[in-house]
Image: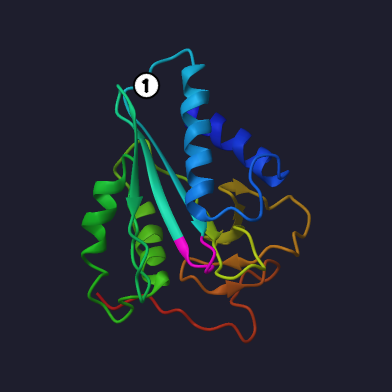
């Protein structure tokens, strides 16, 4: 539970501009967050044998950098995650279902959607239909990170089998949520009310395997 507690608290602190300043570059922000992570963990009462936390952010050129922070049971280790790609790439797969995802992706990687972000999402939705790992399940969750200074990370809704989910939660009985962008299993932008592809939205056919 440590990762969940730390990320929730840290996100609130960062959203309120209590820790970082606008003139910091990514490396400064990363180091500050890494130090906070280590400090918080020293106050945690349970010893975890393994923890991983990923931090992705924009540098001063508004390009993305990423780091992985790992607790190996003895110490915290900080490692760089490669982000310098010219097309969509899989930065990392983690968690108990990672092996299954990598195996399933062999059916998608050489299809006609190669090098597109939707290809990875198609594979994720496909494997969730018959995931064998008992610790993995529920509706897919989607967050977008945009280049440039206009946007921060944005959560999106997912329409799965005619049901609307937001951050993994069934929101069929919630208000209209008109400020949320909705995607279906094919990664097409959809209308929440009709549950169908939004008028004028691009089709995103699943890769031919």
**Local secondary structure at mark 1:** loop
Residue span colored magenta: 59-64
Q: Residue at x 65, y 65 (%)?
A: 151
Q: Which quarter of the picture shows residue 145?
A: bottom right
Q: Residue at x 25, y 55 (%)?
A: 102
Q: Residue at x 51, y 61 (%)?
A: 59
Q: Quarter of the image containing the C terminus?
A: bottom left
Residue 120, horizontal then vertical, whole percent: 37, 65
Picture colour scheme: rainbow
Total marks shown come to 1
Residue tagged 1: 48
Report if residue 1 is visible in the image: no
* Magenta-span inclusion, residue 62: yes
209 is higher (above) or lower (below) than 8:
below
Residue 109, horizontal then vertical, whole percent: 25, 70
Report if residue 196 is visible in the image: yes
The one nearer the camera, 153 or 192, is 153
């Amino acid at each position: 539970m440590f990762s969940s507690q730390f990320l929730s608290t840290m996100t609130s602190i960062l959203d309120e501009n209590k820790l970082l300043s606008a003139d910091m570059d990514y490396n400064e922000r990363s180091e500050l967050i890494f130090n906070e992570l280590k400090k918080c963990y020293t106050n945690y009462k349970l010893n975890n044998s393994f923890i991983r936390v990923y931090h992705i952010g924009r540098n001063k050129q508004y390009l993305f950098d990423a780091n992985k922070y790992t607790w190996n049971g003895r110490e915290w280790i900080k490692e760089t995650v490669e982000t310098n790609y010219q097309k969509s790439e899989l930065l990392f797969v983690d968690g108990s279902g990672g092996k299954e995802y990598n195996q399933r992706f062999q059916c998608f990687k050489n299809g006609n959607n190669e090098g597109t972000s939707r290809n990875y999402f198609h594979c994720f939705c496909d494997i969730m239909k018959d995931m064998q790992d008992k610790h993995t399940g529920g509706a897919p969750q989607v967050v977008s990170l945009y280049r440039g200074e206009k946007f921060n990370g944005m959560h999106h809704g997912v329409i799965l089998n005619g049901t609307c989910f937001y951050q993994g939660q069934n929101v069929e009985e919630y208000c209209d949520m008109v400020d949320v962008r909705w995607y279906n299993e094919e990664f097409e932008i959809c209308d929440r009310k009709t549950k169908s592809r939004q008028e004028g939205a691009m089709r995103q056919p699943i890769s031919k395997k």
